[in-house]
Image: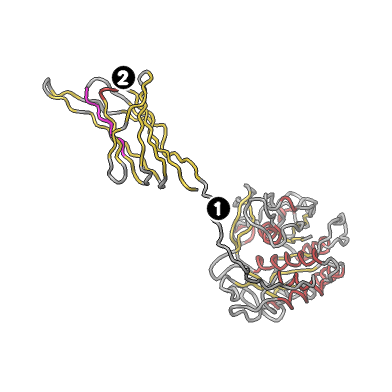
């Protein structure tokens, strides 16, 4: 069970299967944007801001859903991403709204997430194994915040927090500087400390958070202010690193439910892998889910052995599909014209068709509407310059069918229709090339 104390949740096909009832802890109705204070609906109403409301302008971040997707987005659903712990349940605790949030709301959210009583609120019937707080601000850890974290830890919840994104010592950031939390720094794609990540002695461990070249893809909404529909986006920050650790904590609890918060922190630190880049002040190392799980299940990794009788892999049979380029059209053909009584000028029409790939068993089919097909000659020029006179296979009324085979090469095919007698104007109704292609 992973509780995400953040901006709430948005409906999303990669999150819906793991979603459990949460709570909106925001006391201010204006910050919550739902017209009231605290309530049982933890949906994200959007945290967009304007200069007049917060002193700065920004679009809605859908931050809580991005964090949740990293931790436990569904697996094997044919969609988007897979979270670190894809079978873990998600309890959204909405503590951040317009212009941020209050530490008192956040502290109450921690207690509620752990299944502890909060005055005036119903008890959370799904106490969290791990509480993720990808949030923070400057200052020291207030006593009421520390009390809430201590109570949640005593109840069995592991509290994971982001170190912060100010490129400074995390000892000045709350709740990163609180006791009884696992504080997470961020490494970028090069394995070094991300340029923005906070650092220092209060940091316990690091995880990938994007930066130094790329971001972390996860679940969001597509709306710039209010909700508009499910989407995915890349973000970077220690906010993205923390839920990776929270997801590993959920895996450890699933493997061994009796593990205490301190035992889990010790395992994470003891099994962390060395940094491949420079990450001073990033804790004991980079979180290693596999090594941590082995440690709590008394597992032993097995060395791969070479097969005694290796065999060459068998390539799967190729999938062949018939692909058609072009199709119905409506092109008026040029009629022949008479110059005085002694000269007739042929009407020549050329129509191009692009075939994107090479294939086999190629065939071109053409339908021309004309009152006298004996006046026409129809020629196909292939991309390599080869010309083929197309055979008329049938005539039904004024519609004549023409066909020829091709060598299946890609490129531009040109159909040339020559009308030799004036007075009867025709039209090209269909021009398509079909061939078998390997998919």
What residue appears at the point 70 percent right and 77 percent down from the top-left corner? 203
> Which of the two marks, 2 or 1, is nearer to us in this view?
1
Q: Is residue 33 rendered magenta in the image?
A: no
Residue to which mark 1 is pinned = 316
Q: Secondary structure at mark 1?
A: loop
Please give left or right for residue 138 compared with residue 367 in the image.
Answer: right
3D distance between C-alphas at marks 2 and 1: 52 Å
Q: Position of residue 127 (x, y in %)?
A: 84, 60
Q: Which mark is residue 371?
A: 2
Upstream in sequence: badge 2 or badge 1: 1
Compared with 23, 363 (above or below) is above
Occupied quadrant, residue 88: bottom right
Q: Position of residue 252 (x, y in %)?
A: 78, 67
Compared with 179, 401 (above or below) is above
Residue furthest front as drawn: 309
Please give left or right for residue 149 compared with residue 207 in the image.
Answer: right
Q: Position of residue 360 (x, y in %)?
A: 41, 44
């Amino acid at each position: 069970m992973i509780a995400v104390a953040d901006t709430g949740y948005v409906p999303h096909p990669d999150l819906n299967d793991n979603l459990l009832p949460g709570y909106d802890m925001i006391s201010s109705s204006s910050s919550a944007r739902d017209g009231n204070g605290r309530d049982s609906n933890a949906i994200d109403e959007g945290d967009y801001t304007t200069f007049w409301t917060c002193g700065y302008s920004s679009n809605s971040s859908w931050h809580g859903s991005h964090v949740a997707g990293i931790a436990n987005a569904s697996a094997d659903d044919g969609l988007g991403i897979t979270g670190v712990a894809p079978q873990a349940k998600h309890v959204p605790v909405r503590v951040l709204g317009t212009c941020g949030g209050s530490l008192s709301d956040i502290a109450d959210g921690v207690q509620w997430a752990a299944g502890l009583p909060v005055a005036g609120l119903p008890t959370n019937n799904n106490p969290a194994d791990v509480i993720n707080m990808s949030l923070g601000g400057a200052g020291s850890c207030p006593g009421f915040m520390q009390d809430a974290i201590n109570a949640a830890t005593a109840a069995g919840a592991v509290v994971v927090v982001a170190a912060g994104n100010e490129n400074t010592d995390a000892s000045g950031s709350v709740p990163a500087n609180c006791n009884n939390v696992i504080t997470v720094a961020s490494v970028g794609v090069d394995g070094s400390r991300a340029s923005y990540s906070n650092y220092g002695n209060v940091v316990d461990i690091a995880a990938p958070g994007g930066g130094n070249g790329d971001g972390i893809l996860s679940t969001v909404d597509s709306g710039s202010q209010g909700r508009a529909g499910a989407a995915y986006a890349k973000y970077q920050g220690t906010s993205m690193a923390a839920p990776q650790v929270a997801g590993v904590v959920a895996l450890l609890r699933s493997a061994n439910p009796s593990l205490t918060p301190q035992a889990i922190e010790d395992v994470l630190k003891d099994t962390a892998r060395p940094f491949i880049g420079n990450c001073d002040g990033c804790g004991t190392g980079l979180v290693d889910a596999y090594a941590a799980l082995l440690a709590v299940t008394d597992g032993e990794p097995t060395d791969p052995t070479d097969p005694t009788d290796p065999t060459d892999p068998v390539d799967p049979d190729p999938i062949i599909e018939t692909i058609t380029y072009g199709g119905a059209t409506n092109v008026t053909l040029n009629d022949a014209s008479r110059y005085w009584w002694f000269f007739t000028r042929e009407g020549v029409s050329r129509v191009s068709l692009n075939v994107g790939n090479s294939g086999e068993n190629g065939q071109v089919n053409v339908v021309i509407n004309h009152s006298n097909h004996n006046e026409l000659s129809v020629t196909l020029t292939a991309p390599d310059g080869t010309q083929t006179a197309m055979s008329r296979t049938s005539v039904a009324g004024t519609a004549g069918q023409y066909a020829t085979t091709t060598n299946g090469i890609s490129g531009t095919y040109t159909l040339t229709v020559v009308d030799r007698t004036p007075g009867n104007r025709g039209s090209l109704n269909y021009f398509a090339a079909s061939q078998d292609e390997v998919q």
